[in-house]
Amino acid sequence: MIDVIISGCGPTGATLAAELRLHGVRVLVLEKETEPLPLARIVSLHIRSLEQLAMRGLLERVLERGRQRPVGGIFAGIPKPAPQDLDSAYLLGIPQPVVVRLLEDRAIELGAEVRHGRAVAAFEQDEDGVTVELTDGERLRSKYLVGCDGARSTVRKLLGVGFPGEPSRTETLMGEMPATAPQEEITAKVAEIRETDKRFMLSPVGEGVYRVVIPAAGLSSEPPVLEDFKHQLHAIAGTDFGVHSPRWLSRFGDATRLAERYRVDRVLLAGDAAHIHPPTGGQGLNLGVQDAFNLGWKLAAQVRGWAPATLLDTYETERHPVAADVLDNTRAQMELSSADAGPRAVRKLLAELMDFDEVNRRLIGKITAIDLRYDFGEGPDLLGRRLPDLDLKQGRLYDRLHQGRGLLLDRTERLNAEGWADRIDLTADPAAPLDAPAVLLRPDGYVAWIGEDQQDLNTHLTRWFGPPAGA
């Protein structure tokens, strides 16, 4: 029997497969597409996603294939530089097919099996597992099934999980294509139009190519064609800027939906199968990847038999509110992009407020997930939050998390996690730049305990990592 079948090998599914394989879980990933999608669109990897990739030793792989960009201006496109004391001042622009391939290759390196041209057609679950029927009639048996199969998720629909929210009200065209008009002319015209229409954009991506974003009002082509872009550019700007030979074209709406549940017994949802929203702020891919980091070690613990009784339930209780917050901030950003007088006035006021570093930092922290705090109960503000990549005597903190295990970072040099040595690593460093005597980090890099009492530590080790070996 397979331990886990994952439906969908996009960023979420590939990340989840790699996380499970770190713990020796037998994983099969089903991807309906036989070849990568031809869209070479640039996506943004935000600070928290880059940090979690660094925790698995993948940061250099993505950095060498992407382009660092400033973090400032990512909320509703309001042009404010990031505060100087921000942990990280850049995000990474990277072609989506490249990041998908990197994550899939990593999962395969670790031993995951990926089958392209295969998709889930039906499934039924019982107390012991899930029987999955593929579109070609093959039947497979697994302990768990995870739907990472996108906004039109087959797994979610077959599971009968509601997907409430709002349908699209506005449609937008997006693509990348060269333009023959001089860049100075394009820049000046775009600046003039964006004074009143924030949904209009031609931004250079290099070598005379532009990312084109324009309203699609009145157009019905699906998929869109170059003539749609030319028509809309003429209607709004009075010229099409000589655009030609598109690299890719797409059309998206502002539909916003959130699955009512992330888990029904042995079947779970992650990524776009669980939530959809407009691409404003570039949060979608990041939200899904971070779902996978949260779920991976918990599902592995369940499969391996050491998970506390409620551990897998915390996937939904932690990630569902995070997605709800992302949906709300994208709703707000879409309103701020309206050309109507009211939203324009609110946008102007917000731009003034963002001159205060605290406001600017808060909005950047919301988009990039570095301000995320899970509710682990009462305790210091650091509880439930991330740690930055601290410089320790044994090297960087994130280098200690490459194997996907928990970590006890102890400044007292008195604590231990001996009964959990198969699940927890220990770093004793009295000089660690940490405002706490000791912290327990989960495999996804969030602080699960703060203190210096061994008995209290043992209680929290059991809460998150199950009973000690031999108990």
Image (spheres, helix red, strand yellow):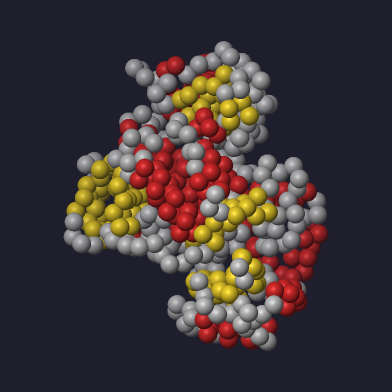
Q: Residue furthest top?
A: 414
For the question of whether residue 259 can be seen, the reply is no
Residue 74: x %, y % from top left: 66, 58
Identify the residue at horizontal 60%, vertical 63% (top origin). Answer: 280
Identify the residue at horizontal 36%, vertical 42% (top origin). Answer: 109
Residue 229: x %, y % from top left: 56, 81
Q: Quadrant of residue 341?
A: bottom right
Q: As displayed, is residue 360 above or below residue 53?
A: below
Q: Between residue 140 and residue 329, name the one nearer to us.
A: 140
For the question of whether residue 92 can be seen, the reply is yes
Identify the residue at horizontal 30%, vertical 47% (top origin). Answer: 113
Q: Between residue 199 and residue 39, name the one nearer to us.
A: 39
Q: Between residue 363 and residue 104, name the one nearer to us.
A: 104
Identify the residue at horizontal 68%, vertical 47% (top origin). Answer: 89
Q: Quadrant of residue 311?
A: top left
Q: Quadrant of the C terminus?
A: top left
Instruction: Tell whether 8 sits left or right of 195.
Output: left
Q: As displayed, is residue 295 above or below residue 278?
A: above
Q: As displayed, is residue 337 above or below residue 323?
A: below
Q: Between residue 165 and residue 271, name the one nearer to us.
A: 271
Instruction: Tell whether 154 sits left or right of 397.
Output: left
Image label count? 0
Q: Residue furthest front?
A: 207
